[in-house]
Amino acid sequence: MLTLKFIQDNKELVVERLKIKNFDASQIVETIIELDNGRKATQVEAETFQQEMNALSKEIGQLFKSGKAEEANKAKERTGELKESIKVLNAKHDEITAQLNEQLVSLPNIPNEIVPPGKGEEDNVEVKAGGTMPQLEAKEPHWDLIKKYDLIDFELGTKITGAGFPVYKGKGARLQRALINFFLDEADKAGYNEVIPPLLVNEDSGFGTGQLPDKEGQMYHATADNLYLIPTAEVPVTNIFRDVILKASEMPVKHCAYSACFRREAGSWGSHVRGLNRLHQFDKVEIVQVAHPDNSYEILDKMVAHVQTLVEKLELPWRMLRLCGGDLSFTSALTYDFEVYSAAQERWLEVSSVSNFENYQANRLKLRYKEDGEKKAQLAHTLNGSALALPRIVAAILENNQTDEGIKVPAVLVPYCGFDIIK
């Protein structure tokens, strides 16, 4: 969340910048400032009463010793009144603080200055593109190719669990494993430290990265234990650093993780959500960095370049988009999406989002750093990106590489798969 000090010092800026996200923050900002003023006034009043009570407590003993019992008893009566007033003020302070925090978490992150205005994905801006568009005689969509070559069984997944939980089989399973290992190896070469995180997280972790209280409806909730299935490895990996103070010299910290991801919002009908286009459970490799505020945008550029190399090595047509304000997430300051072209569907499929959250997540996480020789800790910046999400990558590989003989496997995956064609 935005820091209280930043909101106080930049009231007009916050309201103006959040208009880019099509969010009217004017009333919330006013409420935050009013609540903070009320909280401070309550605290000052309680502290004044506490000082008076402390002074009276010292006097009471002296009054009794001096034989001034009547004055001492009046002082005792006054301390009782003050104690009760302080109790009431502390309760009021806690109530105002809770209301203040509720308002703070309802305020999205402000977008970077280069975020374009817009209402939705149609207003995103193409930054660059690459690859060669496939020229195909036959254009079977991946959901037909999957059945033709017996790679993935959606009906079996529905039987076992429900719609959106596919079962990967044979060469389909091996292609899936090949992609995961390829992505992890590429992340390792780029200096990322691999971790294997839990697939369930607690409320504190969901709050730390901004999934809670914003996205409860999109997450699977294990109510008996009050745990949430992760929508992305970003959540547990970033929470490694919750309540941590790093040394500036330790940054950037670079982690990567493979995980299954679980999302309830997946659709169940229409070509745009058919087959692998949208699932309730899918595999993804995530890259996460904790960075110094001075160079987090340089790091964002490096993360974007890393994702670009992945789609290029897979020989897929790709494009990179800068998300407009209306398509930017609640927590992000700047996001670049990567899309690959689906030859049979004749449309672009999103396969990665790479984002800088600046100190928005770090403030929730209490993730800080100290400069060498400095006593005061400051908020770090957090970044993450999909590198990559598998389902639509698989869809594009199957569709774009289909031939009369079978589906050709991208050369970079052959050592991982152990075969160069799916027949």
Image: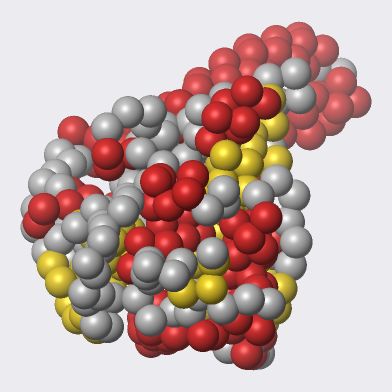
Tell me the residue at 37%/31% (across/down). Answer: 267
Q: Residue furthest front?
A: 404
Tell me the residue at 73%/56% (across/down). Answer: 197
| In front of the other: 88 or 288 | 288
| In front of the other: 385 or 410 | 410
Q: Is residue 220 at all visible to an observer of this figure?
A: no
**For this view, does 422 lie left or right of residue 143?**
right
Residue 216 place in picture, x, y as percent: 49, 29
The answer to whether residue 176 is above or below residue 288 is above
Residue 145 place in picture, x, y as percent: 43, 52
| In front of the other: 341 or 59 | 341
The answer to whether residue 73 is above or below residue 173 is above
Q: Residue furthest right?
A: 65
**Quarter of the image where the C terminus is located:** bottom right
Which quarter of the figure has residue 179? bottom right
**For this view, does 76 lie left or right of residue 159?**
right
**For this view, does 113 lie left or right of residue 367?**
left
The answer to whether residue 37 is above or below residue 269 is below
Residue 351 place in picture, x, y as percent: 39, 61
The answer to whether residue 339 is above or below residue 130 is above
Q: Is residue 164 at all visible to an observer of this figure?
A: yes
